[in-house]
Each structure stands twice: as C-alpha cells, then as structure tokens.
Amino acid sequence: MIDRNLVDLQYLEEVLDNFSKATGLHVAIVNKNGESFGLFETAERCEFCRYIRSKPSGVEKCRASYKQATQEASKWEEPYFFRCRAGLVIWAVPITLRGISLGSIICSQVLLWKPDRFFYQELHELNPEVNDFAELERTAGQLDIISPVRFQAAADVLYVTVNQLMKRDLHVLENVETYKMQQLIHKELEERKRQQLSLVKEGYDYGSYLQRERSFLRYIRLGDKPRAEKSLHTLFIQLFVKSTGEQVPIKLRIIELAALVSRAAVEGGAEPETVMVLLETFNDRINDCQHLEKFFSHMKKFVTMVLDQSVALEEKKYNGLVNEAKAFILENYSQAIKIEDVAARLFISPSHLSRLFRQEVNCTVNDYITRVRVEQAVELMKKPELSVAQVSQSVGFQSQSHFAKVFSRYIGVAPLIYRNSLS
C-alpha cells in the first residue's frame, strides 16, 4: 500500500475514475510489488482479463507484469509501454516523490491492432495453462482496439496529471514531516522531564552525539538507507535536546553534518560531482531557513537524495545488480564469502560483477566485503563483553592477526588500542 501521508490517494482515485470514464481505458493504482488496491482493486476487468486471472497462477502473472512495468517506468521516469505476460499491450505511469518510486498507474485491457493469426499464435504460447483456446480467442476478440496515437496521447495526459499531483503532495509532505519532527522533539522533551533525567545520564553529551554520528556516517558509506534514516532521527533529537533548542549551534552542527555526509557518500561510491551539487543546494536552502524544524527537514531530504542518487544510477544501468550484491554482502559478511559466492547469487560471472563494482562503487568486491566487515567490527567493539578475538570471528575474519592488520589499515589504530579508547 502507498502511504497516504505521501500521496492523496482519494484525490488520485477520483482523477483516475474520471480518466477511465472519459477514455474507456481500464486503470489501476499499484505499489512497487505490482499489487493493486483502493477503488480499483475490485474494479470490473474486461472478460479476457477475468478469464486469464481465473486460471492457475493467473493473478500472479498479472501482478508480475505490473511489477515489471512499475520498475521500468520508475527507471526511465516516463510512461513505459510493453507486452504483459498474457499478451496485451499495457503502459505504466510512474508515481514518484523526490525521485523515490512509490508505485505506478497501470493502463491496459485494449489492443493496438486487429488480432491476426500471429497474435493468436503468440497468445497460445504465452498462456500454456489455458486448455480452452477457443474461449481464450473469443474473449480476446472482444477487446477494444484503439490507435497507437490515441494510446500515446492518453499516456502523456495521465503522466502530466500525476506529475502535477505529486508536486502538490510534495508541499503537503513537507508540512507533514515538519509536524512529525515537532512531535518527536516534544515527546522526547516531555519524557525527559517526566523521568527527571539529566542530559549526561541520558546520553545527550557531545561525546555520545559524536559516537552516534560516526555510526550514522558508516551507514551512509555502506548505503544502508533504513538504518541511516533511523540514526539521523536520533541525531536530530539528541542535538535539539543538547542545544536546548538554540538555532545557532543546531544550524552549525547541521551544516557540518551535511559536509561529512557528502564525503561519506563519495567514499561509499556516490558520484562526487552530483553529491557536491546536492550539497551546494542544501547549503543555499539552510542559509535562507529561519525555522528550526526546517533545518531538520532539509537535512533529511539531503540525506535521502544523496543515498538515492547512486542507487538510481545502478538500477538504470544494470538493473540493480550492484545493489543486490551489496545487500547480499550486508546479510552474509560474517560468513566466508568471496566474489564467486556473490556472483553465483546474482547468476552472473565474477568478472562481470567485478567490472560493475569498479564502475559503480570504485572498488573491488573483496574491498567492499572487507569494508563492511571493518565497519561492523567497529560497532561490535562497543560491547565490552566481546573480546577482540570474538569480534574478529563474528565479522568473518578467519585469522585474528589478519583482522588486526586490516583494521589498522582502515581505522588507523590497532583493534586493542581502539577498544581501550572507548573506555
């Protein structure tokens, strides 16, 4: 389901309902997984589609088609036309907010040409689970036929409409985010007052802040968006409480943090020129900002865009292979994984994966695995109950001496010295 805080779904459904009545085209709102919902979840489909969906795996076939169309539309940021898995031409209009894909609008259940023997031959090949081909052909013959020009025009009109709607919702979202940040800060302050806890006892000294900041920057370097965003919220609240809401120190810390984020993102493989442009835009906005919550809102947007831009490049060029490889490594770094294991998981050759990593992340696969292991080791070092040897083993190093050498190269000091510096 698309978050109703992000998109005015009721208004979008009304627009699509009127569009469907005016054009006679069937439409559906789907999420990134190809699942339709809302007003159009139970909308009447054409007889052909009802017949296909009544067969084993028929609904799943539709969902897979919608998911693929949504992914492609999001990649190219424009209406995407293709043949669905039942044989019909469909198109998808992307629903995006700040470059993030939320889903798409699917328009289908028509033909662009009169069915001929080649069409029916392909129909049989695409639907082997159907036994009654005569019935399949009959329902296909009932489909409306519209010209490609009319089909393209309908796609363009809907694309413009959705873009205007998303621009409006973006303004609404900014107000929602500001309100949420106000609520988080207020809740934290009230909780601290209720428990009568001191700043230091609660971990709101700058030493604690800098420690959390280091963790946050590690998530940026690793491209771990969920943990980076969660960590950023914690930093915001801690910074506000420690600064007692004073704008000047908060503004200075936010500007400083943005610079650190940009460098961490580049170290993680983001394109330097793009990141610097985003940083300049952020600095211009923050300098003109007068409200405290807006500082946090602009910072959150900046972090999201920095993390998304490198992922978007990977997906457009290589269907997210590098991103999938990163995810696999993050899940299995504690095991004895090698480039061959990662490549096998993605069904590509190790040499091809190696080229992709050098192009997109500017390092080798093994370098990335090592980087992840060291970053995780730094986190585990905070647990005094774990020895250096246990930390080494937990993050996938087979030899403690090798771990010490690698850790020293990345962090600048030996593991034991680093451990002692935390006490």
Image (cartoon, rainbow, N blue to C red):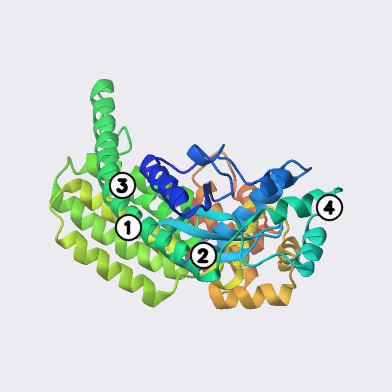
Q: Secondary structure at mark 2?
A: helix
- Relative side of 139 to 299, left or right: right
* Amino acid at pointer 2: Phe
* Mark toward the start of the polypeptide (2 vs 4): 4
- Relative side of 236 to 80, left or right: left
Q: Position of residue 390 (x, y in %)?
A: 64, 47
The CA distance from mark 1 to mark 2 is 20 Å
Which is more toward the observer, 195 or 273?
273
Residues under numbered marks 4 and 1 in contact, where contact means CB atoms less than 8 Å apart: no
Quadrant housing residue 11: top left
Q: Residue 151 has which mark?
A: 2
Residue ID at (75%, 62%): 341
Which is more toward the observer, 282 or 259?
282
Is residue 195 shown above or below 221?
above
Q: Position of residue 274 (x, y in %)?
A: 38, 73
Q: Residue tagged by mark 1?
A: 164
Q: Residue tagged by mark 4?
A: 133
The CA distance from mark 1 to mark 3 is 14 Å
Residue 405 seen in render: no
Q: Secondary structure at mark 1?
A: helix
Q: Residues within 10 Å of mark 3 (few under 14, many from 20)?
A: some
* Mark toward the start of the polypeptide (1 vs 2): 2
Q: Residue tagged by mark 3?
A: 173
Tag count in the figure?
4
Indicate which label's residue lies in the foreground, 3 or 4: 4
